[in-house]
Image (cartoon, grey):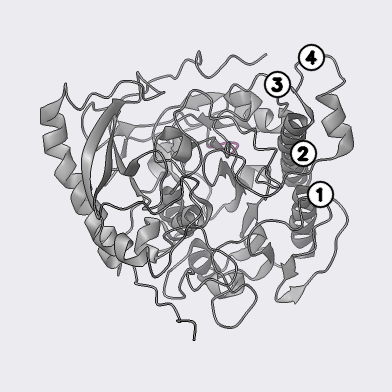
Amino acid sequence: MTPSPHRLSYRRLAVLVGCAVTCLSWRTANAATPPARPNVVVILCDDLGYGDLACFGHPAIRTPHLDRLASEGVRLTSCYSAAPVCSSSRAGLMTGRMPSRTGVYDWIPEGHVMHLRSSEVTIAKLLDQANYDTCHVGKWHLNGKFNQPDQPQPGDHGFDHWMSTQNNAGPSHENPKNFVRNGEPVGPQEGFSCQLVADEALRWLDDRKSDDPFFLYVCFHEPHEPVASPRDLVATYLDDDGPKARNEDEAQYFANVTNLDLAVGRLMDSLKERGIEKETLVVFTSDNGPETLKRYPRGTRSYGSPGPLRGMKLWLYEAGIRVPGIARWPGVIEPGQVSDVPVCSVDLLPTLCELAGVEPPRDRPLDGTSLVPLLTGQSFKRKKPLTWDYFNALGGAKAVMRLGDFTLLAKRAAPDVETTDGRGNPNVSPVTMPIIKTETLGGFELYDVTNDIGQTHDLAASKPDFVAKHAPQLVKKHREVRDEGPTWEFKTQE
């Protein structure tokens, strides 16, 4: 059995304690320059918790394909999403920018005015312009008016081919009816969402006519509620020997993660069968931390594990934004590594631009840093500290900055109002939009997340000089991104 994350030995590579700049490197398989313009597969799960994989310490869930992927590359134990909530996180990943800069301040309900604007430059746009074939399959969740001309669709953001849903697979992961392929509704499908997503990805790879490199963005709906899993997999967590689930609902969740693991295995096997494994960088991660509150009408199966981390999805404490991360590139990344170098999904755009020989946008701030030095075994220096903000966050903190070993968090100082009912449901609206634009910070907390991964000991009182030095930095960044983001306008009901 894989040891609990509480006992995992996170190998420190090097950290400049108390500084925003980190100088680190991974081991590479050889000293040669990595192949130019590699294929790229980015796999994004939905609500997968830091502790939900066997290779990240879950005592019962079986994930042999992801465990193998980790053993063939590097397991990233300090991997972060761009936000603790889905739409915002996806906006950050696609643009390399803090989500508030893009105006995707929260998750996007169906029909909502909020969306990723066409003025944003995405990974897919940049790679498409560099003659990459581009494909999106699975959950999109970057607009409210899905498959409508009012707002940009996946194709408008650079994807040559897409089979996507606005939000979750509906009515559940089983036999979904709400996929749209290149603007045409697919209709009812038989099977489970992750396998249907894998089917489409493999079909697209089969149908490609060019020898150009490709960017394949695979966005599984699993294990987001409403959870539905194959009966035979559920039974293995109730009847078989070995670690068991405590009840049917927990078994459904465990089986859900195992099913997405099987889908990942199919994708990885296909790369090997096609002889392109060594030409392909694979990145696996999650959009945010696990759901545990069972907030949905049929949300009784939210058994995600934050591992040793504090909080859950929607929190800006570690469990909301620290997620499983795996990177594999045979011949470039030496297998079997474990790295605690802090990396984030906003780093993907500058990284892929450098690998593809594409100039990243220079007309707007980027918050990510290219990880190519890490990939190639060189010293890595982050240009600016990783920072997060979420006006609707649960747990108290509304903004956080990673500073070497430390995380500095801040609560809302003003306006002194609550934007949620304690469950995070209210969204961007005429009521909350002014709060987003005028919110100020205070009530700082400080944690040494290298030695106190569970954030149990607030060090703000014992390190006042550190807080005094860096709090203005967090406040300034928070104000900068909120000022850049648009003010959404809402039609009044007559």
Q: Quadrant of the N terminus?
A: top right
Seen at 29% across and 61% down, the residue is 482
Q: Does dot 2 land on a helix, a strand or a loop?
A: helix
Q: As rendered, which of 454 and 417 lies closer to the eye?
A: 417
Which quadrant of the view contains residue 206?
bottom right
- CA gap between label 2 and label 4 equals 18 Å
Are the residues tagged 2 and 4 within 8 Å (C-beta)? no
From the viewer's perspective, is 431 left or right of 181? left
Q: As rendered, which of 416 and 241 lies closer to the eye?
A: 416
- CA gap between label 2 and label 3 equals 14 Å
Q: Is residue 209 visible?
A: no
Q: Which residue is mark 4?
A: 242
**N-term mark: 1 or 2:** 1
Place of residue 261 in the rendered image (x, y in percent of width and height, measured from the top left): 72, 37
Identify the amino acid type marked 2.
Answer: Asn
Place of residue 227 in the rendered image (x, y in percent of width and height, measured from the top left): 73, 44
Rendered image: mark on residue 259: 2
Estimate how packed mark 2 is, as few (under 14), some (14 to 19) or many (20 or more) residues with alpha carbons within 10 Å.
Answer: many
Q: As rendered, which of 275 and 423 lies closer to the eye?
A: 423
Q: Does dot 4 land on a helix, a strand or a loop?
A: loop
Q: Which residue is mark 1?
A: 192
Q: Which residue is mark 3?
A: 60
Is 328 one of the magenta-colored residues?
Answer: yes
Are the residues tagged 1 and 2 within 8 Å (C-beta)? yes
- CA gap between label 3 and label 1 equals 22 Å
Are the residues tagged 3 and 4 within 8 Å (C-beta)? yes
Magenta-highlighted residues = 327-332
Identify the amino acid type marked 4.
Answer: Gly
